[in-house]
Image: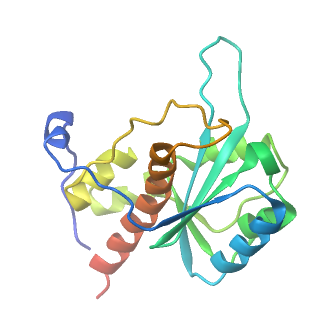
Amino acid sequence: MIQYTHSITKEQMALLPVEEFKGRVIVVDTKKDTGRAVEYLSQFERIGFDTETRPSFKKGQRFKIALMQIATEDVCFLFRLNRIGIPKVLEEFLSDDAVQKIGLSLRDDFGAIKKRTDIEPHNFIDLQNYVGQFGIEDASLQKIYAILFNKKISKGQRLTNWEADVLSESQKKYAALDAWACLKIYNKLIQDNEL
């Protein structure tokens, strides 16, 4: 099994070029479009997964999960859960064993999903728990990505309003990148370690 660099410093990361998702980003904000998106995603063996929640700047104030990003290698669907909730077809996809879903820090995502629906997510791999066997000690998406690809992921949009009427281009790119990066990390680890 290939062992990678154990960790990377913030100073080393600052020198790296910025990564960007160059695929198609499709915003899904109707139940009908959700069905189409899930039908497409169900054809893949594995996908990248992430969520975004509107940040709260007041003590005790919490928002529900606003966005769910599901990515293939060249398309990312942004499901606007603050508009459509989690439709049954999307619930079924998240519970389906047929498609492997790759994310990071999934306990937080699952906790947020539980506030919207009572489903049991299936066939998820949490990169935080997975990368250690390859010698990678850093558990953040930014650091894991930098170690494997020598590029940095900008977190500039993280604290923006994910419930905005219209998501900005920067928000869309940021959201898509995180889900896609999870898939890319997993695929690289698998490919590099196939005999």
Count of number-bearing discs: 0
The correct choice, above or below, for 90 with respect to 51 in the image is below
Left or right? Give the position of 194 relative to 37: left
The correct choice, above or below, for 157 with respect to 100 in the image is above
Q: Position of residue 170 (x, y in %)?
A: 45, 44
- 101 and 24: which one is in front? 24
Q: At 79% across and 71% down in the image, what residue appears?
A: 35
On-image quarter of the C terminus: bottom left
Q: Residue furthest top?
A: 59
Q: Position of residue 58 (x, y in %)?
A: 64, 12
- 124 and 18: which one is in front? 18
Residue 50 in view in this figure: yes
- 8 and 89: which one is in front? 89
Q: At 74% across and 74% down in the image, what residue appears?
A: 36
Q: At 43% across and 68% down in the image, what residue appears?
A: 23
- 21 and 71: which one is in front? 21
Q: Position of residue 4 (x, y in %)?
A: 21, 61
Q: Residue furthest bottom?
A: 195
Q: Position of residue 5 (x, y in %)?
A: 18, 55
Q: Quadrant of residue 44?
A: bottom right
The correct choice, above or below, for 46 with respect to 133 in the image is below
Q: At 34% across and 56% down in the image, what residue appears?
A: 20
Left or right? Give the position of 90 relative to 70: right
On-image quarter of the N terminus: bottom left
The correct choice, above or below, for 42 with respect to 120 in the image is below
Left or right? Give the position of 13 relative to 183: left
Residue 137 in view in this figure: no
